[in-house]
Image: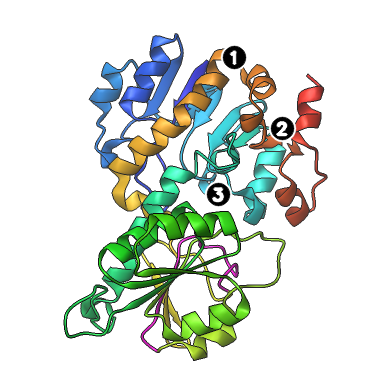
């Protein structure tokens, strides 16, 4: 199979889908890998390392024209609309449920879209999302730390337990991988951490793994209001179903917070779990609503592009290899976890939330596979 690895064009996105060691694994098995010039440079992987691994270094036009599978990191941006062709496989984080224009372009292009974020495993977890969730959770807390600094407009409160000072309070919504990663950093510095969730198993895991300065509460309205009134930092670490119209934190709740509170919405779903969230970029990462600072950058792992690229490439490679070795139809037949992530199939929408959000007929991945 001819596999193309383009350079990401999203604002300050420096990750690369396949690091040189992944390219070597693919080329050793007879696949041709086209890597765009400079695709991995900012992540610490120069072109000569890709060439040594057997890749052909080329331009974006050649990659999109010749590749049978596009293997990338982020969703398709308007500048990339029209570049995909019928039957071409797109393997990336697609996040189509809140991107109507991108969805329309990919439907019209009749591509095969498989979303990293929806690949499952036998435990019901999301193995291609998990490593980036950890990076985002830890990076998100680092950014909270940064924007609390005086030079960044914050109050100058250090988010750490220090003798003689009141211990800062960190509120974390979600006990999943992202929340656990954020709590690990926050707790390690001695902060008082409150985590909220509705999944008892996840809550018990957080209680077991983290220290005594972490309390775990059920996420109900009373506990949310009590916690946000005391919080110095609020971190949202859960994805929000875009079909929902409710929120966990409403705009009206901002007036209950300390005026110095920092909100870090790692999920960055517009009007999602946090009603006042709107997606920002690394170039312009923060804004204020009713005096409360919001940081809502969706690609935090790009701040640590080398580490993130290695983790992401390692996680996605086994699935990319299955598609390349077997062909996409057989890979979807054989692997239910890969099949769960099928989002587009030759103009049909096979991810239910996307179909409902944007008004397309929904066709299940199982129905697609049964037609082979």
Q: Earlier in the sequence, mark 3 or mark 2?
A: 3
Residue at which label 3 appears = 78
Secondary structure, mark 3, is helix
Q: Quadrant of the C terminus?
A: top right
Secondary structure, mark 2, is strand
Query: Alpha-carbon neighbours of circle 2 within 10 Å: few (<14), some, or many (≥20)?
Result: many
User: Is residue 188 toward the left or the right of residue 229 in the image?
Assistant: left
Q: Quadrant of residue 117?
A: top right
Q: Earlier in the sequence, mark 1 or mark 2?
A: 1
Q: Is residue 118 visible?
A: yes
User: Is residue 53 toward the left or the right of residue 368 in the image?
Assistant: left
Gap in Å between the C-alphas at discs 1 and 2? 17 Å
Residue 325 lies in the magenta stretch: no
Secondary structure, mark 1, is helix
Residue at which label 2 appears = 345
- Look at the image and give the residue range highlighted in magenta: 259-274
Q: Nearer the viewer, residue 239 or 9?
A: 239
Q: Is residue 142 visible?
A: no
Answer above or below: position of 341 versus 160. above
Gap in Å between the C-alphas at discs 3 and 2? 20 Å
Q: Earlier in the sequence, mark 3 or mark 1?
A: 3
- Rendered residue at 71%/40% (across/down): 107
For marks 1 and 2, give the one nearer the viewer. 1
Percent x, y of residue 56? 36, 19
Q: Nearer the viewer, residue 243 or 216?
A: 216
Percent x, y of residue 161? 23, 75
Q: Nearer the viewer, residue 182 or 199?
A: 199
Q: Nearer the viewer, residue 97 or 81?
A: 97
What is the number of the mark on residue 326? 1
User: Is residue 76 toward the left or the right of residue 336 in the image?
Assistant: left
Residue 268 lies in the magenta stretch: yes
């Amino acid at each position: 199979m001819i596999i193309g690895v383009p350079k990401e064009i999203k604002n300050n996105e420096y990750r690369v889908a396949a690091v040189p060691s992944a390219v070597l694994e693919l080329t050793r098995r007879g696949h041709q890998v086209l890597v765009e010039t400079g695709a991995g440079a900012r992540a610490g992987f120069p072109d000569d390392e890709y060439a040594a691994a057997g890749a052909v270094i080329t331009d974006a036009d050649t990659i999109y024209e010749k590749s049978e599978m596009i293997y990338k990191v982020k969703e398709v941006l308007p500048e990339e609309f029209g570049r995909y062709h019928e039957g071409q496989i797109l393997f990336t984080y697609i996040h189509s449920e809140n991107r109507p224009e991108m969805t329309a372009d990919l439907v019209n292009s009749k591509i095969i879209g498989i979303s990293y974020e929806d690949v499952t495993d036998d435990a019901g977890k999301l193995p291609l999302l998990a490593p980036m969730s950890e990076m985002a959770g830890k990076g998100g807390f680092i950014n909270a730390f940064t924007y609390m600094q005086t030079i960044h407009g914050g109050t100058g409160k250090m988010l750490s337990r220090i003798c003689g000072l009141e211990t800062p309070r960190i509120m974390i919504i979600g006990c999943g991988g992202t929340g656990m990663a954020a709590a690990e950093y926050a707790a390690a510095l001695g902060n008082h951490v409150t985590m909220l969730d509705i999944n008892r198993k996840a809550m018990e895991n957080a209680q077991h793994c983290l220290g005594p300065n972490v309390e775990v509460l059920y996420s109900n309205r009373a506990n949310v209001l009590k916690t946000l009134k005391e919080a110095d930092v609020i971190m949202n670490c859960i994805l929000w179903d875009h079909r929902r119209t409710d929120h966990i934190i409403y705009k009206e709740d901002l007036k209950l917070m300390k005026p110095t509170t920092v909100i870090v919405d790692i999920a960055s779903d517009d009007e999602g779990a946090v009603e006042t969230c709107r997606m920002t970029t690394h170039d312009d990462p923060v804004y204020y609503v009713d005096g409360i600072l919001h940081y809502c950058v969706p690609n935090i792992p790009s701040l640590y592009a080398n580490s993130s690229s290695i983790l992401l490439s390692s996680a996605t490679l086994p699935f990319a290899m299955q598609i390349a070795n077997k062909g996409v139809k057989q890979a979807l037949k054989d692997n239910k976890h890969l099949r769960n992530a099928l989002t587009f199939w030759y103009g049909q929408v096979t991810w239910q939330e996307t179909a409902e959000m944007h008004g397309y007929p929904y066709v299940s991945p199982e129905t697609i596979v049964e037609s082979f």
